């Protein structure tokens, strides 16, 4: 399967690479600010579009892709292609993929940004259904989870805090449908297993956004506690779910760099 892989790796001076894994409805494009920034700090930086996303193969079967199997296999294939120790950074659904990858594989470190929590997406589903009951129903009746973010207003409500209209529209037009199989997995059929990850002693950082309407700070704190890293968890005031595209994205990137340097990564 052909996977889209964006790279900023020409002037890498550090031994570890970084692989950014996007969340639901997104693709590798969402790391457009992070890729050059981390490359400027000496890292070979990569972002993949999971199967069915972005310019990767498999869009025609997007409803049926498994995150725990297919998306994890995509990450494993790209890590092998990169060919050097690779720090994994997962946003939202990408955080779930990273957690599932680490259950069976090793990595120098992992960073979870507004990640699907260890408890899954039930909380998000209930909150979304309360705010937007018709859109929630329509997405499931039409078998098109893209309708969760089917208008610029819905996308803004779930993903962003204060963002210029032109930026909102640029990102909105790149959003896409998502997998029903992954929805079932993350509702409860295949939740993360922190004990398996902790056994590998992988350094992990959990980052949360104060105004995130998708996954709450409370859920992210429980995730950090499950991985025994609550003491290093960081919460970004005034920020919403798409932390890597928010106006203050550099604060998130700098916090990641500080943590990575502190662990000699």
Image (cartoon, helix red, strand yellow):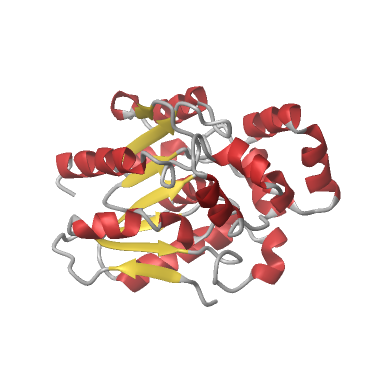
Q: Say which of 257 and 102 sits in front.
A: 257
The image quadrant that residue 7 belongs to is bottom left
Compared with 143, 127 (above or below) is above
Compared with 162, 14 (above or below) is below
Residue 201 in sight from this viewpoint: no
Compared with 234, 5 (above or below) is below
Seen at 15% across and 59% down, the residue is 14
Q: Give the side of residue 213 with respect to residue 90, left or right.
A: right
Q: Say which of 44 and 80 sits in front.
A: 44
Compared with 17, 211 (above or below) is above
Seen at 33% across and 37% down, the residue is 205
- Quadrant where the N terminus lies? bottom right
Question: Where residue 186 sits: x, y (%)?
Answer: 62, 43
Seen at 52% across and 60% down, the residue is 27
Residue 221 in sight from this viewpoint: yes
Question: Where residue 84 sits: x, y (%)?
Answer: 25, 66
Of all residues, the one furthest to the bottom in this rendering is 2
Question: Where residue 119 sits: x, y (%)?
Answer: 56, 32
Q: Say which of 8 and 205 sits in front.
A: 8
**Number of dots carrying numbers:** 0
Seen at 41% across and 56% down, the residue is 31
Question: Where residue 234 sits: x, y (%)?
Answer: 34, 29
């Amino acid at each position: 399967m052909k996977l889209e892989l964006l790279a900023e790796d020409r002037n890498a001076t550090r031994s570890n690479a970084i692989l950014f894994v996007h969340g639901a409805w997104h693709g590798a494009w969402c790391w457009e600010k992070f890729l050059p920034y981390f490359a400027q700090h000496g890292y070979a930086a990569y972002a993949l579009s999971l199967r069915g996303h972005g310019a990767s193969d498999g869009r025609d079967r997007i409803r049926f892709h498994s995150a725990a199997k297919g998306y994890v296999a995509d990450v494993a294939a790209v890590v092998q292609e990169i060919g050097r120790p690779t720090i994994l950074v997962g946003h939202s659904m990408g955080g779930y993929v990273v957690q599932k990858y680490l259950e069976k594989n090793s990595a120098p470190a992992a960073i979870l940004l507004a990640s699907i929590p260890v408890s899954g997406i039930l909380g998000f589903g209930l909150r979304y259904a309360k705010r937007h009951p018709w859109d929630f129903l329509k997405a499931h009746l039409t078998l098109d989870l893209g309708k969760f973010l089917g208008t610029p207003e819905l996308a803004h409500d779930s993903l962003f805090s204060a963002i210029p209209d032109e930026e909102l529209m640029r990102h909105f037009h790149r959003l896409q449908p998502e997998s029903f199989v992954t929805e079932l997995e993350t509702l409860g059929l295949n939740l993360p297993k922190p004990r398996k990850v902790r056994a590998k002693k992988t350094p992990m950082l959990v980052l949360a956004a104060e105004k995130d309407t998708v996954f709450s700070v409370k859920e992210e704190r429980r995730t950090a506690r499950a991985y025994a890293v609550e003491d290093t968890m960081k919460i970004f005031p005034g920020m919403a779910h798409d932390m890597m595209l928010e106006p203050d994205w550099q604060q998130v990137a700098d916090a990641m760099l500080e943590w990575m340097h502190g662990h000699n990564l």
